[in-house]
Image (cartoon, helix red, strand yellow):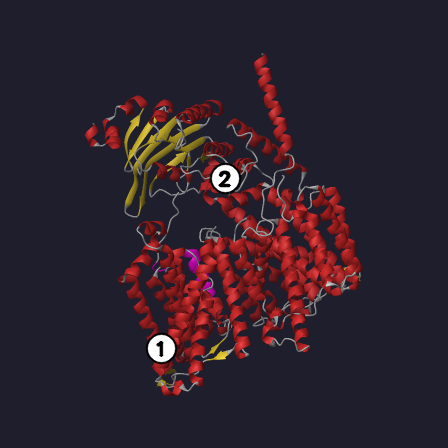
Amino acid sequence: MEQLAHILPQSLLDGLILGFVYAMVALGYTMVYGVLELINFAHSEIFMVGAFAGTETMLYMQSRGYMGALPAPVALIIALIAGILVSGTLGMLIERIAYRPIRYAPRLVPFISAIGVSFFLQDFVRLVEGLWKNTFYLTAPSLFTAIITVSPELKIPVKSLIVILAAVIMMLALNLFVTRSKWGKAIRAVAQDKDTAALMSINVNSVIALTFFIGAGMGGAAGTLFAVQYSLINPYVGYLLGIKAFTAAVLGGIGNIPGAMVGGLLLGILESTGIVLISFITHGAIGIEYKDVFAFAILIIILIFKPGGILGEEVREKV
Amino acid sequence: MAQKGWLFLTDKTRTSQVLAWAFIIVAGVLFYLAPSSAITFLMFLASLLVLYKVPAPVTVKLPVAVVWLCVIMPLAGLQNSYYLDVVTQAGIYVALALGLNIVVGFAGLLDLGYVAFYASGAYLYAIFATTQAGNFIHAPWAHFPVSGMWFWPFLIFAAFLAALLGVLLGFPVLRLRGDYLAIVTLGFGEIIQIVLNNLDKPINITNGPQGLTPIQPPALFGYSMSHPLDFYFIVLVIIVLAITVARRLEASRIGRAWAAMREDELAARSMGVPLVKMKLMAFAIGASFAGMMGVIFAAKQTFVDPSSFSFMESIGILAMIILGGIGNVAGAVVGAVSVVVLQLQILKQLSDYLSYLATQGILNIPSQADPSEYQRMIFGLILILMCIFRSQGILPARRRLASWWERIRSEQTKKQAGESVDAAGS
Amino acid sequence: MLLEANGVTKRFGGLMAIDRFDFNMEAGQIASIIGPNGAGKTTFFNMISGYYHADQGTIRFNGKNLTRMSPEQVAGCGISRTFQNIRLFPGLMAIENVLVGMHLHLAASLGQIVLNTGGMRREEQRAYEEAFELLRYTGLEEKGQDLAKNLSYGNQRRLELARALAVKPKLLLLDEPTAGMNPKETEEMTRFIRRLRDERNITILLIEHDMKVVMGISERITVLNYGVKIAEGTPKEIRSHSEVIAAYLGEEAV
């Protein structure tokens, strides 16, 4: 029991950080689903591209000596902007090329197309990085190296706090945008009823493109933060995380923006502490290597028993 | 039906038919004479497709197909074992694609965890056909590995085990909508791989990432079948069976029920179609195909490990049926052969050619850009392009009328005419 | 009493769609349910069909309690229907649409299908013959191999009927069967509905807006307004019922 008390605080913190990353990525899934009823399978790779964009930016700054000259928060902001812009643009591009032409096709067709985009991007980034940098495993330069030692069991790296802070700021900004601004209202209108929104002279295509930009941008920012937090990235880092972030979005209620945030945090903490608890209870028979199974199990259970999620609503088919 | 052929070769005009048959015969002969050329190989494969599409009675086409597949291919294969292996590999995937086609194409259920059933069959056989089973079954009468004669019953066991798994997996997820179903099945697929990797403690069942080897080859009354040609014929027989089963299902009340479910679930239910039962059946039947092929895969490779059963495999098989034509039995065949040939043949050729250029100093592509490494990009591109430009696939699914439809129609119409004449007369 | 609904209530969120609705039908009757749009008529049908379950009250059919049944089970009891907005299987041929309706009456097992047994082949052939008969009965004998989506509107309505008949129902629910039809087609449909009851002994319950059809064919009419039954009786009684007139034409018209 004491052993548990030792590990738990740290895993709680880890879960929290992970949760914020999940939350930001989940926002992308939930926003796109809200306007198109499409699970953007490629969002995980948009996240990954953002990670690469941010990392490459930081590496570039490092090679030019800017890293030492600039204060770390500024460097972070620059990297974040790079991540957001690259991913956001990529998101819009994907929508334009791979989703818009088949928007009204039977439901599974855009979904399969999204799977195709996801796979394509994984290898595409690998190819590009392979040709350019001769490797596709990148290490982001460390930005914040200080560590706050609360106790022997709980060491909080400053970078984790910065990551959390950045995530919170961005999510609040998004929430404000969606609830207060004119464009935000347009997005919510399109999410409710595309055709009627069009009748109200809302340019649906533009709104959808904007939604993709914002959602993807969030994913890209999450990617950059991920790189800052965990340092090592590769083209396949998005896949698993993406599915978990999607789980988070569903957990909170797909299409529901605050839900994505709640779901993300909840999933991160559950995943991190849950597996520790289970491992403890089963004396290691089900150990930490089953972490992903645990996350998938949560996904499956939610989709089967409460597909509406925590904050979501039931939607009935009109007969 | 008179229609402009897909490629001029399928037109009903005289010239087209002559050209088509000329192509078929030339391709067959050329491949027999020059079995090591990539071009003749591809032509040979194409000739089979043309043979399928050419308008001629089955009694003519069937013997040709038999000769092509049971004489020319094996003889060519004896001289060039690489192509034999490609074709056998393609064959395994053909059966897998046919199975997934039943789940996705017939019943409209997007199962992204299909590879789990494949793995179950492979591991089932592998555990008993190596010494592995001895790790946890301690009985005096049990000798592991079991003899190769057990391969055949294990085909059946694996089919049933996979079907059972299909029902277990299907039952909780049935009510889910298309894309959610896909994600959940994806989750299951991932879970299976993790479980396979970690089931080496506390009891060692799967031997974890190290895998299981050596696996007993199949045997028939003392004759051990480890020659590539043996596997070729085993796979060929299974494919013929799979195609037969798939076509019979399609034309039956079950196939119609699936089609109805796909088109309008609510209306189907209102007409009495038992949704749950039909979906479970699709899952189970599709899974059984995969389970069976798992056994064959294990026996052929003599080695299984969890890495062969990744999500990539499921996506690859999905790409095959999307490419070939979703819901179309022949489409599944075409798609599977195309993708396997693309990977093993064309990409490899490209990769060899590029390294040849590199050694000649003409072009220097770093090893990073070796085409044969970029499966995901290829699959991804196939999926995207097909979805945008031709989502129905190379061979779109078509509804077929029962062979006796014309007879019934004319009989009934005559009967009706006869009745009205009687009525008028009396 | 073939169909008995007692105190059926259904709420959607805050909206009361049907409020303590009682309804009876004898076997062999032709009855209609009418009312302004949104009155709850289709909701009631959907509850019989098993899409929605009543919040309160029961629906009994031939003594069996339908209230919690699934659509397949309802069909199995001998109830089939057509839809307000035609719901055929568009990618299937006309004959296949009808064959799907026969699903409950086909018994070939998986094994028989896979082995292509003589028994299964015979059953299929009989099924095709019966399906063709139904197509002929609804005037679609030339259209058997056409895809449902390619049929004209009128033919699609006929096909939906043929399919519903394939279920061999004791009770047939028709949801606005003459919607979108011209007077001649409406006349044909009315006669056809009567034939169904007379020749095939099917009890028929209609939702209709065309008053000519309703008055001409119904033995009993039930009027719903805002989920509440406001009148019930013969066409003559309903025609002059003040509340009904008020519901349709507004209070001032009375």
- Confirm whether residue B159 shows in the render: no
Q: Which mark is residue A77?
A: 1
Q: Give x and y (percent) for residue B282.
A: 56, 50
Give whichever of C82, A61 is nearer the camera. Answer: A61
Q: Is residue B137 magenta?
A: no
Foreground residue, B147 or B224? B224
Tag 1: amino acid: Ile
Locate residue B273 relative to residue A245 in the image: left or right.
Answer: right
Above/below status of A15 relative to B19: below
Question: What residue did someone put label 2 on?
Answer: C149
Chain identifier of the residue bearing label 1 in the image = A
Residue interval drawn in magenta: A295-311
Q: Which of the 4 quarters of the picture holds residue C251?
A: top left
Where residue B388 appears, x then y in whole percent?
Answer: 51, 55
**Disc 2 is attached to a residue of which chain?**
C
Answer left or right for C155 relative to A265.
Answer: right
